[in-house]
Amino acid sequence: MRRLWILAFFLFSLQLWAGAPRAMIIFDASGSMWGQVDGERKIDIARRAMRDLLRDWNPQIPLGLTVYGHRRKGDCNDIETPIPVGPLDRQRMIRAVEGIRPKGKTPIARALKRVAAQFRGSEDPATIILISDGKESCDADPCATARELRKSGIRFVAHVIGFHVDRTTDRQLACIARATGGSYFSARNAAALNRAITQVAKKITRVTKIEARPKKAAKLPASVTLTALGESDRRGTVKTVGITGVHWWVWQDGKAVYADNDPMNHQPEISLHSGEARVRMLYPDSSEPQTLERNVTLQGGKNRIVFYLKDGGVTIEALDHGARSKSSVHLYPIIKGKVDESKEADWCITSPRKGCSYHLPIGRYYLKGTCKGQKLEGEITVRENEEQTVRLDCNAGK
């Protein structure tokens, strides 16, 4: 079982700190931290991320450090707090992290229980930020633990970052975020991890500023357009086609306010109010369905919320004795192992001058074409950030 490491911040207000938030870092030192990502040890990536975080940390927010798995192998109770919450001492914190040697198991659920228990009975909310490179290795279901802690009256939100994890682990970690009303980010490498940590740190600063305001901001009418595009659209290189059948869900003020399962309405416009909201998007029409979810801040007036799907590029050429030729090409998604011709991704006609170029959501597609009276069929796979060329032989059946 892969182990995980966590960086968790609990923000809450105490009289000792005159209403200021406090934070607790929970650092995973399980044995899997010796593993590598892109040729670099995960423990080194984690230490560097910690140094960057501490460099930009707001010194007005008291900070502590909890570590697990660093002293004994196979011990699910190996959890320690070497630095209690208090005024930030950057050098002391860095020395503590640099001295960690990964060794044991990953008791994520027990660590959450132990740290959360310190704040039981407090009326002030807390925020947890969890960075994980794998699954719980001691208890069965950390998502269930998160739900139980919430039901017990401990007020907290968990923002979760999956670091180079598989899809099964992605789902488990996203469940923790959903169970607590938090956000989930999937980071595939060290650079993505640092970007995710930066976003979370900004959330902490934003929460601090909001709590300091004596009055709540007035709620203003907000018009929201929900849009699904491809990563190629984000880069501005080429438009991604084939994005249909998108489903949307929206929550605001702790309630579900919108659900759209109409496959033809992939860019709905809805009416909400200014403030925080949570949006989830599902793109199901693929051999690799994609679910994206995040918290958003809406302004009064018009808002556009964009989710970017993983995509890749395909160029299709028809060749007649080695020369480009005219052909008709249709692409259909393969969903749950079957070709679905009712959901055509796109079609085009190649010419002697150029082929057909697509950017499509990742997954498997079935190609059907005609060239010189010949029927051409076959399967192609679109991979993330990959450009490929498919050449059709117009003389294959002759």
Image: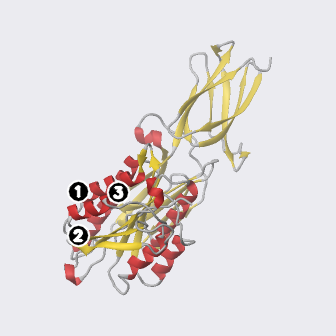
Q: Residues within 10 Å of mark 1 (few under 14, many from 20)?
A: few
Residue type, numbered disc 3: Ile
Q: Residues within 10 Å of mark 3 (few under 14, many from 20)?
A: many
Q: CA distance from mark 2 to mark 3?
A: 17 Å
Q: Which mark is residue 197?
A: 3
Q: From what the image shows, is residue 75 above or below residue 350?
A: below
The C terminus sits in image quarter:
top right
Residue 371 shows in this picture: yes
Q: CA distance from mark 1 to mark 3?
A: 13 Å
Q: From what the image shows, is residue 196 above or below residue 369?
A: below
Residue 299 shows in this picture: no
| Rendering coords of residue 367 (x, y %) | 69, 34
Q: Residue at x 45, y 68 (%)?
A: 72
Q: CA distance from mark 1 to mark 2?
A: 13 Å
Q: Residue at x 72, y 19 (%)?
A: 394
Q: Residue under label 1, please give it.
A: 55
Q: Residue under label 2, please give it.
A: 61
Residue extending farthest to the right is: 398
Q: Secondary structure under badge 1?
A: helix
